[in-house]
Amino acid sequence: MKLLQVDFEYQGALGDEMSKALVGLAESINQEEGLIWKIWTENESDKLGGGIYLFEDEVSAKSYLEMHTARLKGMGVPNVRGLVFDINIPLTQINKGPVFKGGTV
């Protein structure tokens, strides 16, 4: 499994307004190859949007990052930061991190 962290400057609506406006996008993300889950992130004071994603493998994570970066740039977002991380499973289990499908790795 691989964790993908993405953030970017975001000048659009946040909170409830963002939730209503981006339902279709959220639903389409569920269809991405290798995606296990996504947590949407927003920081109104710093005007940042983004997400934390869990993918089955590095190929899926990097493929999604490439596609998503192009999509965001097409929407006028010039700078997208994306980082792919390994997960330390033993420590994550201690802290009840939601990285398990059906309770198993």
Image (tube, helix red, strand yellow):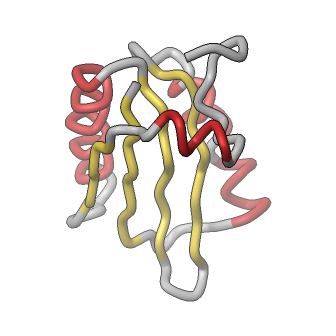
Left or right of residue 96, residue 72 in this image:
left
Residue at image coords 50%, 51%: 51
Residue 86 vertical position relative to residue 1 in the rendered view, above or below: below
Q: Which residue is nearer to you in this view: 90 or 33? A: 90
Residue 59 vertical position relative to residue 88 in the rendered view, above or below: above
User: In what quadrant of the picture does the N terminus appear?
Assistant: top left
Say how many tags the image has.
Answer: 0
Residue 75: x and y in percent read 33, 53
Left or right of residue 97, residue 82 in this image:
left
Residue at image coords 62%, 23%: 100
Left or right of residue 86, residue 30 in this image:
right
Residue at image coords 59%, 30%: 99
Left or right of residue 69, residue 33 in this image:
right
Residue 48: x and y in percent read 47, 72
Residue 14: x and y in percent read 65, 67
Residue at image coords 41%, 18%: 56
